[in-house]
Amino acid sequence: MVLNLNDGGINEECGVIAIYGDNGVDPTSAACYGLHALQHRGQTSCGIAVSDDSGMRYRKGNGLVIDYFTPKILEELSGARSAIGHVRQGRKGQESSILAQPIVVNSRIGSLAVSMNGSITNREELMADLKQSGTLFHTNTDAELFINMLSRTCISGNMTGAVISTLAFAKGSYSIVVMTDKEIYALRDSSGNKPLTLGRLNGNWVVASETCALDIIGAEHYRDVLPGEVVRIDDTGLHSELVRGGEQNRCIYEYLYFSRPDSIIDGKSVYESRVEFGRRLAKVLPVKADMVVGVPDSALAAASGYAQASGIPQGDGLYKNRYSGISVSHATHGKPERGVRLKLNAIKDNVAGKKIILVDDSILKGTTSKWIVEMLRAAGAKEVHMRISSPPFKYSCIYGLYSISNSELIGKEHSSDNINAMIGSDTLAFLPLEDMIGAMGEEKDFCSCCFNRE
Protein backbone atom coordinates (compact mmCIF):
# COMPACT_ATOMS: atom_id res chain seq x y z
CA MET A 1 0.00 0.00 0.00
CA VAL A 2 1.38 3.41 -0.96
CA LEU A 3 0.47 6.26 1.36
CA ASN A 4 -0.79 9.71 0.45
CA LEU A 5 -0.48 9.30 -3.30
CA ASN A 6 -4.10 9.35 -4.32
CA ASP A 7 -5.53 12.38 -2.53
CA GLY A 8 -6.87 10.57 0.48
CA GLY A 9 -5.93 7.18 1.82
CA ILE A 10 -5.00 5.21 4.87
CA ASN A 11 -3.89 7.40 7.74
CA GLU A 12 -1.47 5.48 9.89
CA GLU A 13 -2.67 7.43 12.90
CA CYS A 14 0.03 7.59 15.56
CA GLY A 15 2.48 5.75 17.77
CA VAL A 16 3.07 6.30 21.49
CA ILE A 17 5.76 5.32 23.96
CA ALA A 18 6.47 5.93 27.65
CA ILE A 19 9.35 4.99 29.96
CA TYR A 20 9.28 5.27 33.75
CA GLY A 21 12.51 4.93 35.71
CA ASP A 22 16.17 5.72 35.17
CA ASN A 23 17.72 2.55 36.55
CA GLY A 24 20.62 2.16 34.13
CA VAL A 25 18.53 3.75 31.38
CA ASP A 26 18.22 7.24 29.93
CA PRO A 27 14.44 7.55 29.40
CA THR A 28 14.93 10.27 26.77
CA SER A 29 17.22 8.16 24.58
CA ALA A 30 15.02 5.09 25.07
CA ALA A 31 11.95 7.07 24.00
CA CYS A 32 13.78 8.37 20.94
CA TYR A 33 14.86 4.89 19.84
CA GLY A 34 11.38 3.54 20.51
CA LEU A 35 9.80 6.27 18.40
CA HIS A 36 12.20 5.45 15.60
CA ALA A 37 10.86 1.88 15.66
CA LEU A 38 7.31 3.27 15.52
CA GLN A 39 8.06 5.69 12.68
CA HIS A 40 5.87 3.67 10.30
CA ARG A 41 2.85 4.78 12.32
CA GLY A 42 3.43 8.46 11.61
CA GLN A 43 5.91 10.63 9.73
CA THR A 44 4.40 14.14 9.93
CA SER A 45 5.60 15.11 13.39
CA CYS A 46 7.27 13.73 16.51
CA GLY A 47 7.81 14.77 20.09
CA ILE A 48 9.16 13.79 23.51
CA ALA A 49 8.26 15.18 26.94
CA VAL A 50 10.29 14.37 30.06
CA SER A 51 9.75 14.82 33.77
CA ASP A 52 12.05 15.06 36.78
CA ASP A 53 12.23 16.92 40.07
CA SER A 54 12.65 20.24 38.26
CA GLY A 55 9.43 19.82 36.28
CA MET A 56 8.59 18.98 32.68
CA ARG A 57 10.49 19.75 29.51
CA TYR A 58 9.52 18.88 25.96
CA ARG A 59 10.49 19.29 22.34
CA LYS A 60 8.27 18.52 19.35
CA GLY A 61 7.95 19.51 15.72
CA ASN A 62 7.48 18.34 12.16
CA GLY A 63 9.72 15.77 10.55
CA LEU A 64 11.11 12.30 11.13
CA VAL A 65 12.51 11.24 14.50
CA ILE A 66 16.03 10.77 13.17
CA ASP A 67 16.02 14.28 11.67
CA TYR A 68 14.29 16.24 14.40
CA PHE A 69 15.92 14.80 17.50
CA THR A 70 19.48 15.97 17.05
CA PRO A 71 22.13 15.22 19.71
CA LYS A 72 21.71 18.79 20.97
CA ILE A 73 17.95 18.38 21.51
CA LEU A 74 18.41 15.00 23.19
CA GLU A 75 21.00 16.53 25.50
CA GLU A 76 18.50 19.25 26.48
CA LEU A 77 16.04 16.54 27.53
CA SER A 78 18.50 14.18 29.23
CA GLY A 79 18.68 13.38 32.93
CA ALA A 80 14.95 12.83 33.36
CA ARG A 81 13.15 10.24 35.50
CA SER A 82 10.42 9.52 32.95
CA ALA A 83 9.53 10.30 29.34
CA ILE A 84 6.67 9.94 26.90
CA GLY A 85 6.83 10.27 23.13
CA HIS A 86 4.68 10.43 20.03
CA VAL A 87 4.85 10.11 16.25
CA ARG A 88 1.97 11.45 14.19
CA GLN A 89 0.65 11.09 10.67
CA GLY A 90 -1.22 14.23 9.66
CA ARG A 91 -3.99 14.19 7.13
CA LYS A 92 -4.01 16.53 4.16
CA GLY A 93 -4.29 20.06 5.50
CA GLN A 94 -3.35 19.01 9.04
CA GLU A 95 0.44 19.10 8.82
CA SER A 96 0.93 22.05 11.21
CA SER A 97 3.53 21.53 13.93
CA ILE A 98 0.98 22.99 16.37
CA LEU A 99 -0.77 19.62 16.22
CA ALA A 100 2.39 17.72 17.22
CA GLN A 101 2.28 15.72 20.44
CA PRO A 102 2.80 15.17 23.34
CA ILE A 103 0.50 17.95 24.46
CA VAL A 104 2.00 19.51 27.59
CA VAL A 105 0.12 21.88 29.92
CA ASN A 106 0.59 23.47 33.31
CA SER A 107 -2.86 23.02 34.80
CA ARG A 108 -4.39 23.71 38.19
CA ILE A 109 -3.48 20.13 39.13
CA GLY A 110 0.14 20.41 38.01
CA SER A 111 2.03 19.60 34.83
CA LEU A 112 0.46 17.10 32.43
CA ALA A 113 1.65 15.55 29.17
CA VAL A 114 -0.49 13.36 26.90
CA SER A 115 0.31 11.25 23.83
CA MET A 116 -2.61 9.63 22.04
CA ASN A 117 -3.17 7.17 19.23
CA GLY A 118 -6.74 7.03 17.98
CA SER A 119 -9.94 9.01 18.18
CA ILE A 120 -12.77 9.85 20.57
CA THR A 121 -16.08 9.35 18.78
CA ASN A 122 -18.23 11.44 21.15
CA ARG A 123 -15.80 14.36 21.00
CA GLU A 124 -18.37 16.96 19.86
CA GLU A 125 -20.58 16.26 22.86
CA LEU A 126 -17.65 16.34 25.28
CA MET A 127 -16.13 19.49 23.76
CA ALA A 128 -19.46 21.31 23.87
CA ASP A 129 -19.78 20.50 27.56
CA LEU A 130 -16.25 21.74 28.30
CA LYS A 131 -16.68 24.92 26.27
CA GLN A 132 -19.89 25.72 28.11
CA SER A 133 -17.96 25.62 31.37
CA GLY A 134 -15.33 28.02 29.99
CA THR A 135 -12.64 25.70 28.65
CA LEU A 136 -10.65 27.11 25.72
CA PHE A 137 -9.26 24.87 22.96
CA HIS A 138 -6.17 25.72 20.93
CA THR A 139 -6.33 22.72 18.57
CA ASN A 140 -8.92 20.25 17.33
CA THR A 141 -7.01 17.24 18.62
CA ASP A 142 -8.60 14.55 20.76
CA ALA A 143 -5.44 14.63 22.89
CA GLU A 144 -6.20 18.20 23.94
CA LEU A 145 -9.80 17.20 24.64
CA PHE A 146 -8.56 14.36 26.83
CA ILE A 147 -6.16 16.54 28.78
CA ASN A 148 -8.89 19.14 29.42
CA MET A 149 -11.21 16.40 30.64
CA LEU A 150 -8.50 15.23 33.03
CA SER A 151 -7.93 18.73 34.36
CA ARG A 152 -11.61 19.32 35.01
CA THR A 153 -12.29 15.88 36.49
CA CYS A 154 -9.33 15.77 38.88
CA ILE A 155 -10.58 16.58 42.37
CA SER A 156 -8.31 16.99 45.39
CA GLY A 157 -5.31 15.80 43.41
CA ASN A 158 -6.79 12.35 42.71
CA MET A 159 -5.24 11.87 39.28
CA THR A 160 -5.99 8.14 39.20
CA GLY A 161 -9.65 8.86 39.74
CA ALA A 162 -9.57 11.51 37.02
CA VAL A 163 -8.01 9.13 34.49
CA ILE A 164 -10.53 6.41 35.32
CA SER A 165 -13.45 8.84 35.04
CA THR A 166 -12.19 10.24 31.74
CA LEU A 167 -11.79 6.76 30.27
CA ALA A 168 -15.35 5.96 31.30
CA PHE A 169 -16.71 9.04 29.49
CA ALA A 170 -14.55 9.02 26.35
CA LYS A 171 -15.93 6.62 23.76
CA GLY A 172 -13.98 5.52 20.72
CA SER A 173 -10.81 3.79 19.64
CA TYR A 174 -7.61 4.88 21.36
CA SER A 175 -4.49 4.12 23.34
CA ILE A 176 -3.14 6.91 25.55
CA VAL A 177 -0.14 7.55 27.79
CA VAL A 178 -0.28 10.33 30.39
CA MET A 179 2.68 11.71 32.34
CA THR A 180 2.47 13.78 35.53
CA ASP A 181 5.29 15.02 37.72
CA LYS A 182 5.34 11.73 39.63
CA GLU A 183 3.76 8.99 37.55
CA ILE A 184 2.79 7.61 34.16
CA TYR A 185 -0.61 6.27 33.15
CA ALA A 186 -1.37 3.96 30.23
CA LEU A 187 -4.93 3.30 29.12
CA ARG A 188 -6.71 1.55 26.29
CA ASP A 189 -10.24 1.92 24.98
CA SER A 190 -12.86 -0.52 26.25
CA SER A 191 -12.87 -2.60 23.04
CA GLY A 192 -9.09 -2.83 22.71
CA ASN A 193 -9.34 -1.50 19.17
CA LYS A 194 -5.94 0.18 19.34
CA PRO A 195 -2.88 -1.78 20.51
CA LEU A 196 -0.85 -0.97 23.61
CA THR A 197 1.78 -3.14 25.27
CA LEU A 198 3.92 -3.20 28.43
CA GLY A 199 7.59 -4.06 28.75
CA ARG A 200 10.43 -4.22 31.29
CA LEU A 201 13.87 -2.69 30.85
CA ASN A 202 16.46 -3.01 33.66
CA GLY A 203 13.62 -2.93 36.17
CA ASN A 204 12.03 0.10 34.49
CA TRP A 205 8.58 0.02 32.92
CA VAL A 206 7.98 0.73 29.23
CA VAL A 207 4.68 1.31 27.41
CA ALA A 208 4.47 1.30 23.60
CA SER A 209 2.06 0.94 20.70
CA GLU A 210 3.92 -2.13 19.41
CA THR A 211 6.42 -4.69 20.64
CA CYS A 212 8.92 -3.65 17.94
CA ALA A 213 9.54 -0.52 20.04
CA LEU A 214 10.39 -2.73 23.02
CA ASP A 215 12.77 -4.80 20.91
CA ILE A 216 14.82 -1.85 19.68
CA ILE A 217 15.62 -0.67 23.23
CA GLY A 218 16.21 -4.15 24.60
CA ALA A 219 13.05 -4.33 26.72
CA GLU A 220 11.27 -7.62 27.43
CA HIS A 221 7.60 -7.90 26.60
CA TYR A 222 5.57 -8.18 29.82
CA ARG A 223 1.94 -8.17 28.63
CA ASP A 224 -0.59 -6.14 26.69
CA VAL A 225 -2.71 -3.47 28.33
CA LEU A 226 -6.22 -4.90 28.57
CA PRO A 227 -9.26 -3.28 26.93
CA GLY A 228 -10.67 -0.70 29.33
CA GLU A 229 -7.67 -0.97 31.67
CA VAL A 230 -5.90 1.91 33.41
CA VAL A 231 -2.28 1.17 34.34
CA ARG A 232 -0.49 3.50 36.77
CA ILE A 233 3.30 3.38 37.09
CA ASP A 234 5.17 5.16 39.88
CA ASP A 235 8.01 4.59 42.34
CA THR A 236 6.05 1.78 44.00
CA GLY A 237 5.65 -0.18 40.78
CA LEU A 238 2.78 -1.01 38.44
CA HIS A 239 -0.85 -0.75 39.53
CA SER A 240 -3.87 -1.71 37.46
CA GLU A 241 -7.61 -1.13 37.47
CA LEU A 242 -10.09 -2.47 34.90
CA VAL A 243 -12.54 0.35 34.32
CA ARG A 244 -14.93 -0.62 31.57
CA GLY A 245 -13.63 -3.71 29.86
CA GLY A 246 -16.13 -5.02 27.35
CA GLU A 247 -16.16 -7.25 24.32
CA GLN A 248 -12.81 -6.97 22.57
CA ASN A 249 -12.97 -5.75 18.98
CA ARG A 250 -9.41 -5.28 17.76
CA CYS A 251 -8.74 -3.46 14.51
CA ILE A 252 -7.83 -6.18 12.03
CA TYR A 253 -6.09 -3.59 9.86
CA GLU A 254 -3.33 -3.51 12.47
CA TYR A 255 -2.48 -7.04 11.36
CA LEU A 256 -3.09 -6.40 7.67
CA TYR A 257 -1.20 -3.11 7.28
CA PHE A 258 -0.59 -0.72 10.18
CA SER A 259 1.76 -2.63 12.44
CA ARG A 260 5.30 -3.70 11.67
CA PRO A 261 5.55 -7.37 10.66
CA ASP A 262 7.97 -8.07 13.52
CA SER A 263 5.45 -6.93 16.15
CA ILE A 264 3.22 -9.12 18.32
CA ILE A 265 -0.21 -7.60 18.91
CA ASP A 266 -2.32 -9.17 21.67
CA GLY A 267 -0.37 -12.38 21.40
CA LYS A 268 -0.68 -12.63 17.61
CA SER A 269 2.27 -12.36 15.25
CA VAL A 270 1.63 -9.69 12.63
CA TYR A 271 3.94 -11.46 10.18
CA GLU A 272 2.34 -14.87 10.58
CA SER A 273 -1.13 -13.32 10.27
CA ARG A 274 -0.19 -11.77 6.92
CA VAL A 275 1.38 -14.99 5.69
CA GLU A 276 -1.82 -16.86 6.54
CA PHE A 277 -3.88 -14.21 4.71
CA GLY A 278 -1.76 -14.99 1.64
CA ARG A 279 -2.12 -18.75 2.03
CA ARG A 280 -5.89 -18.47 2.11
CA LEU A 281 -5.90 -15.96 -0.73
CA ALA A 282 -4.13 -18.49 -2.97
CA LYS A 283 -7.26 -20.67 -2.86
CA VAL A 284 -9.45 -17.88 -4.27
CA LEU A 285 -9.65 -17.86 -8.06
CA PRO A 286 -6.36 -19.72 -8.69
CA VAL A 287 -4.56 -19.05 -11.98
CA LYS A 288 -1.42 -20.29 -13.67
CA ALA A 289 1.43 -17.82 -13.40
CA ASP A 290 5.21 -17.56 -13.39
CA MET A 291 5.83 -15.40 -10.33
CA VAL A 292 4.16 -13.96 -7.24
CA VAL A 293 5.03 -10.30 -6.59
CA GLY A 294 4.15 -8.46 -3.39
CA VAL A 295 3.69 -4.69 -3.25
CA PRO A 296 6.38 -3.43 -0.85
CA ASP A 297 6.35 -3.46 2.09
CA SER A 298 3.10 -4.42 3.76
CA ALA A 299 2.07 -7.08 1.20
CA LEU A 300 5.37 -8.98 1.07
CA ALA A 301 4.41 -11.42 3.83
CA ALA A 302 1.05 -12.12 2.19
CA ALA A 303 2.85 -12.73 -1.11
CA SER A 304 5.07 -15.22 0.68
CA GLY A 305 2.03 -17.08 1.98
CA TYR A 306 0.45 -17.03 -1.46
CA ALA A 307 3.59 -18.51 -3.00
CA GLN A 308 3.77 -21.22 -0.32
CA ALA A 309 0.17 -22.32 -0.88
CA SER A 310 0.15 -22.05 -4.67
CA GLY A 311 3.58 -23.46 -5.41
CA ILE A 312 4.29 -20.46 -7.65
CA PRO A 313 7.68 -18.91 -6.80
CA GLN A 314 7.82 -15.50 -5.19
CA GLY A 315 10.07 -12.97 -6.88
CA ASP A 316 11.03 -9.31 -6.90
CA GLY A 317 9.00 -7.36 -9.40
CA LEU A 318 8.84 -3.95 -7.75
CA TYR A 319 11.58 -1.86 -6.18
CA LYS A 320 10.67 0.58 -3.42
CA ASN A 321 12.63 3.82 -3.16
CA ARG A 322 13.14 4.16 0.59
CA TYR A 323 14.40 7.73 0.33
CA SER A 324 11.43 9.34 -1.36
CA GLY A 325 9.58 10.18 1.85
CA ILE A 326 6.04 9.15 2.67
CA SER A 327 4.23 12.18 1.28
CA VAL A 328 5.43 13.24 -2.13
CA SER A 329 2.45 15.32 -3.25
CA HIS A 330 4.59 18.47 -3.28
CA ALA A 331 6.76 16.95 -6.01
CA THR A 332 4.04 15.54 -8.27
CA HIS A 333 2.70 18.83 -9.65
CA GLY A 334 -0.90 17.62 -9.75
CA LYS A 335 -0.02 14.21 -11.23
CA PRO A 336 -0.30 11.65 -8.41
CA GLU A 337 0.90 8.84 -10.72
CA ARG A 338 4.32 10.47 -10.51
CA GLY A 339 4.14 9.84 -6.79
CA VAL A 340 3.79 6.12 -7.42
CA ARG A 341 6.85 6.20 -9.66
CA LEU A 342 8.80 8.11 -7.02
CA LYS A 343 7.97 5.34 -4.55
CA LEU A 344 7.95 2.24 -6.78
CA ASN A 345 9.52 1.06 -10.01
CA ALA A 346 9.19 -2.21 -11.90
CA ILE A 347 12.24 -4.47 -12.20
CA LYS A 348 12.02 -4.96 -15.95
CA ASP A 349 14.47 -7.83 -16.31
CA ASN A 350 12.53 -9.86 -13.77
CA VAL A 351 8.97 -9.27 -14.96
CA ALA A 352 9.33 -9.06 -18.75
CA GLY A 353 7.50 -11.87 -20.53
CA LYS A 354 6.10 -13.33 -17.28
CA LYS A 355 2.61 -13.93 -15.99
CA ILE A 356 2.53 -12.06 -12.67
CA ILE A 357 0.33 -12.51 -9.62
CA LEU A 358 0.42 -9.12 -7.89
CA VAL A 359 -0.46 -9.27 -4.17
CA ASP A 360 -1.45 -6.12 -2.27
CA ASP A 361 -3.06 -5.64 1.13
CA SER A 362 -6.05 -3.51 0.07
CA ILE A 363 -7.71 -1.33 -2.54
CA LEU A 364 -9.36 1.95 -1.56
CA LYS A 365 -9.90 4.24 -4.55
CA GLY A 366 -8.14 1.93 -6.99
CA THR A 367 -5.95 4.57 -8.60
CA THR A 368 -2.70 3.32 -7.08
CA SER A 369 -3.49 -0.26 -8.12
CA LYS A 370 -4.21 0.91 -11.66
CA TRP A 371 -0.85 2.69 -11.94
CA ILE A 372 1.08 -0.30 -10.57
CA VAL A 373 -0.62 -2.64 -13.05
CA GLU A 374 0.22 -0.23 -15.88
CA MET A 375 3.81 -0.02 -14.64
CA LEU A 376 4.23 -3.81 -14.74
CA ARG A 377 2.70 -4.03 -18.22
CA ALA A 378 4.99 -1.28 -19.45
CA ALA A 379 7.91 -3.30 -18.06
CA GLY A 380 6.87 -6.23 -20.27
CA ALA A 381 4.69 -8.33 -17.95
CA LYS A 382 2.64 -10.74 -20.07
CA GLU A 383 -0.26 -10.92 -17.61
CA VAL A 384 -1.03 -9.22 -14.30
CA HIS A 385 -3.45 -10.97 -11.93
CA MET A 386 -4.34 -8.78 -8.95
CA ARG A 387 -4.88 -10.45 -5.57
CA ILE A 388 -5.90 -8.52 -2.45
CA SER A 389 -5.32 -10.00 1.01
CA SER A 390 -8.42 -8.31 2.46
CA PRO A 391 -12.10 -7.96 1.50
CA PRO A 392 -13.29 -4.91 -0.48
CA PHE A 393 -13.48 -1.74 1.62
CA LYS A 394 -17.10 -0.61 1.46
CA TYR A 395 -17.51 1.80 4.36
CA SER A 396 -15.58 4.69 5.84
CA CYS A 397 -14.00 3.80 9.16
CA ILE A 398 -16.03 5.23 12.04
CA TYR A 399 -12.75 5.62 13.97
CA GLY A 400 -11.13 7.77 11.29
CA LEU A 401 -8.47 5.38 9.98
CA TYR A 402 -8.80 6.84 6.49
CA SER A 403 -10.29 10.06 5.15
CA ILE A 404 -12.31 8.69 2.25
CA SER A 405 -16.08 8.86 1.95
CA ASN A 406 -18.18 5.81 1.14
CA SER A 407 -18.79 7.09 -2.37
CA GLU A 408 -15.05 7.27 -3.07
CA LEU A 409 -14.35 3.68 -2.02
CA ILE A 410 -14.23 1.66 -5.20
CA GLY A 411 -15.46 -1.47 -3.41
CA LYS A 412 -18.67 0.25 -2.28
CA GLU A 413 -20.27 0.67 -5.69
CA HIS A 414 -18.42 -1.80 -7.93
CA SER A 415 -18.18 -5.56 -8.21
CA SER A 416 -14.85 -7.37 -8.43
CA ASP A 417 -15.30 -7.74 -12.20
CA ASN A 418 -15.90 -4.01 -12.59
CA ILE A 419 -12.90 -3.14 -10.42
CA ASN A 420 -10.77 -5.55 -12.42
CA ALA A 421 -11.72 -3.72 -15.62
CA MET A 422 -11.12 -0.33 -14.03
CA ILE A 423 -7.59 -1.09 -12.81
CA GLY A 424 -6.66 -3.01 -15.96
CA SER A 425 -5.63 -6.34 -14.43
CA ASP A 426 -6.31 -9.67 -16.13
CA THR A 427 -8.14 -11.06 -13.10
CA LEU A 428 -8.88 -9.77 -9.61
CA ALA A 429 -9.77 -11.54 -6.38
CA PHE A 430 -10.23 -10.38 -2.79
CA LEU A 431 -9.80 -12.46 0.37
CA PRO A 432 -13.31 -13.19 1.72
CA LEU A 433 -13.99 -11.77 5.18
CA GLU A 434 -14.66 -15.19 6.70
CA ASP A 435 -11.23 -16.36 5.49
CA MET A 436 -9.58 -13.22 6.87
CA ILE A 437 -11.12 -13.73 10.31
CA GLY A 438 -10.48 -17.47 10.09
CA ALA A 439 -6.81 -16.80 9.47
CA MET A 440 -6.58 -15.37 12.99
CA GLY A 441 -7.35 -18.75 14.54
CA GLU A 442 -10.03 -19.39 17.12
CA GLU A 443 -10.28 -15.74 18.13
CA LYS A 444 -13.12 -13.89 16.43
CA ASP A 445 -12.98 -10.58 18.26
CA PHE A 446 -12.09 -8.23 15.43
CA CYS A 447 -13.73 -5.08 14.13
CA SER A 448 -14.89 -5.52 10.52
CA CYS A 449 -16.79 -2.24 10.27
CA CYS A 450 -15.03 -1.05 7.11
CA PHE A 451 -15.98 -4.27 5.30
CA ASN A 452 -19.55 -4.97 6.45
CA ARG A 453 -20.48 -2.25 8.97
CA GLU A 454 -20.30 -4.71 11.89
Image: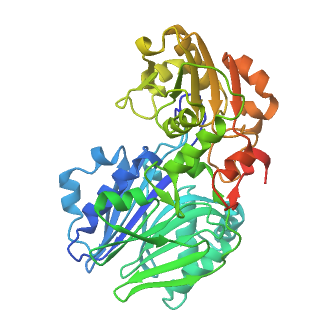
From what the image shows, is residue 30 above or below residue 235?
A: above
Q: Position of residue 75 (x, y in %)?
A: 18, 60
Q: Quadrant of the N terminus?
A: top right
Q: Quadrant of the C terminus?
A: bottom right
* Residue at the (71%, 46%) spot, across then down: 435
Q: Name the image colouring.
A: rainbow
Task: Between residue 197 and residue 85, name the one nearer to us.
Answer: 197
* Residue at the (71%, 70%) spot, across then down: 247
Q: Is residue 255 left or right of residue 444?
A: left
Count of numbered circles on the image:
0
Task: Between residue 286 and residue 229, name the one nearer to us.
Answer: 286
Q: Quadrant of residue 27?
A: bottom left
From what the image shows, is residue 427 above or below residue 144?
A: above
Q: Position of residue 292 (x, y in %)?
A: 53, 26
* Residue at the (22%, 50%) spot, across then down: 70
Task: Between residue 131 and residue 394, name the one nearer to us.
Answer: 394
Q: Which residue occupies the extreme bottom position in the image? A: 156
Q: Position of residue 60 (x, y in %)?
A: 35, 54
In this view of the protein, can residue 403 be seen by the observer? no
In this view of the protein, can residue 254 be seen by the observer? yes
Task: Between residue 148 and residue 297, name the one nearer to us.
Answer: 297
Q: Is residue 83 left or right of residue 272?
A: left
Q: Position of residue 72 (x, y in %)?
A: 18, 54
Q: Quadrant of residue 140?
A: bottom right
From what the image shows, is residue 13 above or below residue 426?
A: below
* Residue at the (70%, 56%) spot, across then down: 447
From what the image shows, is residue 353 above or below residue 317?
A: above
Q: Is residue 425 left or right of residue 260?
A: right
